[in-house]
Amino acid sequence: MKHPLCPRCEAQHVVKSGIINERQRYRCKKCSYYFTVSKLGKNIDSYYVTKALQLYIEGVSYREIERILGVSHVSVMNWVRKYKVKQPEQTEYHPSYKVLSHSELVAHMQSAKNLQGAGMMITELGDKYMMIKWKRFKE
C-alpha cells in the first residue's frame, strides 16, 4: 500500500504511527510531523455546483434543480449557504423551463412565436440543453 505525502514538507518517507479516532496516523521521517489523511468523501464536480447555483439564481426551486441535475436538493441548499447566494426577488415574472435535445431546441427556435413575449436563457446540461423563459404574471 502506498503511503501519503507529508502535508508539511511533502516528503515521501512516511511511516504508520498508530490509529487516532479510527483513522490511520502517519509520521514523516524527514520532519517528524504527525498527521492523518483527511477523508475525501463524495466530491461533486464544480460544473454541477455552478449550474445548480445558476439555476437557483434564475428562480428554479431546489427540488427542480435536483430533478434536472441529479444532485441532492440538500447539497444545493448547502452550496447556496456556503457561497452566500441570494435569489433576486421576482414579483412580476416567473420562470418555466424545458430540457431539450439539440434537434428539439433547433425546432423550437425556428418558430418566431416561441421567441416573442418572454426573456429566455439557454444553458448546456451535458448532451441536453435547458431553456428557461420568464413570463409576466397575468394581472
Image: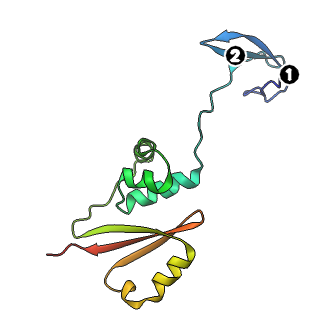
- Identify the residue at horizontal 33%, vertical 57% (top origin): 87
Q: Which three-letter amino acid code belongs to the residue tagged 1?
A: His
Task: State whether residue 17 is above or below residue 116.
Answer: above
Q: Which mark is residue 13?
A: 1
Residue at image coords 33%, 72% = 134
Residue 71: give x, y in percent of width and height.
49, 48
Q: Name the residue under label 2.
A: 24
Residue drawn at x 38%, y 59% is 57
Image coords of residue 114 (percent x, y): 38, 84
Residue 56 in percent (x, y) is at: 39, 56
104 in relation to 12, above or below: below
Q: Residues within 10 Å of mark 1 (few under 14, many from 20)?
A: some
Residue found 26% across the figure and 70% down from its top: 93
Q: Quadrant of residue 36?
A: top right
- x and y percent of residue 27 in the render? 76, 15
Judge from the rendering whether residue 124 lies leftward or rightward of residue 54; answer left or right: right
Mark 2 secondary-structure assignment: strand
Q: How far apart are marks 2 and 1 (CA)?
A: 16 Å
Indicate the secondary structure of the residue bearing disc 1: loop
Q: Which mark lies nearer to you, 2 or 1?
A: 2
Image quadrant in which you'd find residue 1: top right
Please indicate whether residue 132 sits to the left or right of residue 10 in the image: left
Left or right of 71: which side holds 19?
right
Quadrant for the C terminus in the image: bottom left
